[in-house]
Image (tube, rainbow, N blue to C red):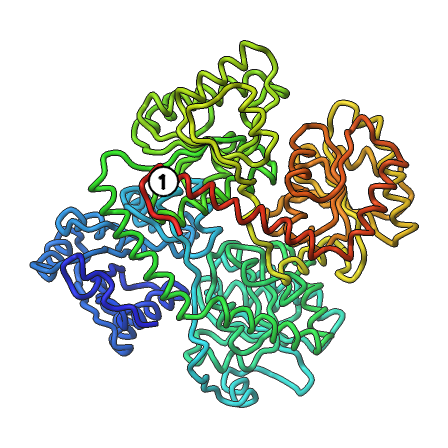
């Protein structure tokens, strides 16, 4: 990766970033900053300013990092000295770490005229746990300083989620994961020699579990000791090695004695040779109550060590539970003990987990990937900062039936956001939604409650584009109010000066002559472009007499999403007790008028599929709030075994999961759309014209009205679907044609914004 010079257009050969940090940092924050700066200076000019002399500054100097130390406990004097040392220098970004760094970054930013970004390495509310004076002083100062920073970087998605929950702006938060060096050969001393050096009593055949952690409350070592007690009662070969020191050490040593396991536990203190520590252990542990993305896990993966960790922070991003490691709930000693016992007694499983987690970590969490991502963040910050200063009006507002827990609507929104960001990667995006928090967390964009009219009005005054996004919004079969709401937002957006686009949508049915005239008037007067997802919607618009907007036939935005990896799908199947080599018939049902009377017919069809084709019925909920109720109404009549999958999952995972089904019976439109992407034979059950319209546009599958559902009709449709299993490639080609025309949706947006689109 050779990317310098990065920013010649800003008047210098290299991007210049200054990093500000207190200098007393230890653990993961220290490792992250030093490793990052060492690598960054190969590509940009990154300089470190430290406000305390000590181990941190000395280690930075030894690593060849450009560092200057300003020893002043007084922030005013420190600021004066920092200004003096930076006098006449061009700084593009001020990058802060920790409480002191955040304070100084805010004090210097006006002088330098550069944006400030801070990396949040841990939950700032827990940083001074057990230290009330420090929490009151440093903690309070940090909380105030954090609110005045321009951009944020969370070390793991859960850390970013915490920031969003606490009201930090979702569209100004980036996420990065700690990375380590997997390329440089690791030097260690022999296991026996190392264990002897730390004073551990060890015999051949013993299994050593190890944890590298500060001995403080947040690391929850007491839970580990209680779990050790339980395991030692069943297996005499497990030993525990703790690398680390801290305020709780004496208390923990006394606890080990009280539990009667002092001879099984070795407190090694701080270790300079951490690689030899990981080389000596068999199981790597993390028991914390709170973390971001701890280095102690990735450092263990370099040595191919099996891992058990508490379900905190970004741990699930690295560990696929039961696939490459084991996860337990924080504070659950019984669950931790069971995991320890499992790995203690199964050497083959330890080795398999060790190899699998090494493969994933080395691919996704290397130092090279971390640096590459950090540089991408810097470039984005510079572009966004310049954009904010240059433009008075900017941004896109997306409106639809979002935040209601429906996977189909989620897929539409995700596709639209991705497409807009591909078109313009720094475009500010705001989504009008019911559940704004879920939108902010999932998509890292701004979100406004759908009926917060003052905020909506203010946002539309500043935006340049309004997207009425996907789905069948212009209809009143379910509600007159929703039709009027969406028509009002179209009118308001145009009235306030926006380009207006209806993106990959469905139309109708609209009942009532007054409503039809209202639809025609608003669409003709307020909409610039309409792209439709199937032919019946085109016919509906023609019947209304809508003529002024540019109207094109495209397809549903969700068609461009790609399935999750095979590993992710396998992990999901395993968690839910589904074998990857079995046959399955998937039902995606929903409650609707008349459905309850048809439940016995669905049940009989499911039983027959199991008996005749060996296909286990699976009931998949696309709307986690409603579809499970429909599934339960069916399963109460069934005799065959079945699975109900009703936990929330990303659309890409659902697409991958549906690819494992042999046939699909769906009342959900996006159940059919997701399944078509894998060429799965389809049976549609229509409660709404959009079901039949999609299957007709696709040119595949069969469809029946809900009112026509019977046991015989369903059995015949499933039989026909089973006969289509050999034609999956043909079905895939039909879906590909719809995927190809979907690109017209974003191409029309590009034309509205006068942007190029590949």
The residue beneath circle 1 is: 751
Quarter residue 501 falls in? top left
Residue at the (37%, 21%) spot, across then down: 454
Q: Is residue 350 above or below residue 322?
A: below
Residue 274 seen anywhere in this rendered image of the structure: yes
Residue 639 x %, y %: 91, 43
Residue 265 seen anywhere in this rendered image of the structure: no
Residue 657 x %, y %: 68, 53
State the residue in front, 344 or 567: 567
Number of numbered discs overlaid on the protein picture: 1
Residue at the (58%, 27%) spot, across then down: 539
| Local SS, label 1 | helix
Q: From the image, which quarter does the N terminus lie in?
A: bottom left
Quarter residue 393 falls in? top left
Residue at the (47%, 60%) spot, across then down: 293
Quarter residue 694 falls in? top right
Residue at the (57%, 31%) spot, across then down: 506
Q: Is residue 338 above or below residue 102?
A: below
- 88 sits left or right of 26 in the view: left
- 100 sits left or right of 231 in the view: left
Residue 80 x %, y %: 10, 54
Q: Is residue 458 above or below residue 321?
A: above
């Amino acid at each position: 990766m050779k990317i310098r010079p990065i920013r010649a257009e800003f008047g210098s050969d290299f991007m210049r970033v200054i990093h500000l940090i207190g200098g007393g940092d230890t653990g993961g924050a220290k490792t992250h900053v030093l490793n990052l700066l060492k690598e960054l200076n190969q590509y940009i000019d990154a300089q470190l300013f430290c406000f305390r002399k000590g181990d941190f500054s000395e280690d930075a100097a030894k690593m060849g990092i450009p560092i200057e130390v300003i020893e002043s406990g007084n922030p005013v004097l420190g600021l004066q000295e920092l200004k003096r040392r930076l006098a006449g220098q061009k700084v593009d970004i001020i990058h802060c770490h920790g409480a002191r760094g955040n304070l100084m970054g805010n004090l210097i930013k006006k002088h330098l005229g550069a944006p400030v970004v801070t990396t949040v390495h841990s939950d700032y509310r827990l940083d001074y746990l057990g230290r009330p004076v420090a929490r009151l002083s440093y903690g309070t100062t940090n909380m105030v300083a954090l609110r005045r920073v321009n951009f944020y970087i969370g070390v793991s998605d859960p850390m970013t989620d915490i920031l969003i929950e606490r009201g930090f702006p979702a569209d100004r938060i980036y996420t990065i994961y700690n990375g380590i060096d997997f390329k440089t050969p690791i030097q260690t001393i022999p296991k026996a020699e190392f264990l002897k050096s730390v004073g551990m009593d060890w015999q051949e055949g013993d299994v050593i579990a190890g944890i590298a952690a500060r001995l403080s409350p947040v690391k929850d070592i007491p839970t580990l000791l209680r779990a050790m007690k339980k395991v030692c009662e069943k297996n005499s070969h497990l030993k525990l090695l703790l690398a680390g020191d801290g305020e709780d050490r004496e208390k923990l040593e006394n606890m080990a004695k009280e539990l009667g396991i002092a001879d099984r536990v070795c407190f090694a203190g701080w270790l300079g040779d951490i690689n030899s520590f990981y080389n000596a252990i068999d199981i790597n542990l993390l028991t914390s109550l709170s973390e971001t993305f701890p280095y102690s896990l990735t450092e263990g993966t370099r040595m191919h060590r099996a891992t058990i960790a508490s379900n905190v922070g970004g741990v699930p991003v690295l560990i696929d539970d039961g696939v490459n490691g084991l996860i337990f709930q924080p504070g659950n000693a019984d669950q931790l003990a069971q995991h320890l016992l499992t790995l203690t007694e199964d050497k083959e499983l330890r080795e398999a987990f060790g190899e699998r987690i090494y493969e994933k970590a080395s691919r996704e969490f290397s130092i090279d990937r971390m640096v590459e991502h950090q540089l991408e963040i810097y470039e984005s910050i510079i572009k966004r900062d310049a954009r904010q200063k240059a433009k008075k009006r900017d941004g896109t507002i997306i409106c639809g039936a979002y935040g209601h827990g429906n996977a189909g609507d989620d897929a539409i929104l995700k596709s639209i956001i991705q497409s807009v960001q591909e078109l313009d990667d720094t475009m500010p995006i705001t989504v009008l939604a019911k559940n704004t928090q879920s939108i902010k967390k999932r998509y890292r964009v701004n979100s406004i409650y759908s009926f917060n009219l003052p905020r909506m009005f203010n946002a539309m005054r500043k935006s340049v584009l309004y997207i009425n996004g996907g789905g069948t919004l212009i209809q009143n079969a379910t509600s007159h109010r929703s039709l009027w709401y969406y028509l009002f937002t179209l009118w308001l957006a145009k009235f306030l000066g926006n380009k207006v686009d209806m993106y990959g949508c469905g139309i109708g049915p609209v009942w009532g002559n007054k409503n039809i005239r209202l639809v025609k008037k608003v669409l003709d007067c307020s909409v610039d472009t309409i792209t439709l997802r199937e032919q019946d919607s085109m016919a509906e618009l023609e019947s209304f007499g809508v003529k002024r907007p540019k109207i094109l036939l495209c397809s549903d935005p969700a068609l461009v999403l790609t399935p999750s990896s095979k590993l992710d799908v396998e992990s999901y199947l395993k968690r839910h007790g589904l074998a990857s080599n079995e046959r399955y018939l998937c039902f995606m049902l929903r409650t609707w008028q008349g459905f309850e009377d048809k439940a016995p017919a669905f049940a009989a069809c499911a039983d027959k599929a199991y008996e005749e084709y060996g296909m286990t019925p699976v009931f998949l909920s696309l709307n986690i709030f409603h579809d499970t109720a429909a599934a339960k109404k069916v399963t109460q009549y069934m005799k065959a075994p079945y699975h109900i999958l009703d936990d929330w999952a990303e659309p890409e995972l659902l697409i991958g999961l549906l690819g494992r089904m042999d046939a699909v019976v769906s009342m959900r439109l996006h159940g059919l759309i997701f399944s078509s992407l894998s060429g799965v034979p389809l049976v549609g059950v229509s409660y709404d014209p959009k079901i039949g319209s999609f299957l007709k546009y696709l040119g595949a599958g069969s469809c029946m009205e809900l009112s026509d559902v019977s046991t015989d009709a369903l059995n015949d449709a499933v039989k026909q679907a089973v006969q289509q299993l050999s034609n999956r490639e043909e079905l895939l080609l039909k879906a590909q044609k719809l995927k190809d025309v979907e690109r017209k949706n974003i191409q029309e947006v590009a034309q509205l914004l006068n942007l190029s689109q590949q």
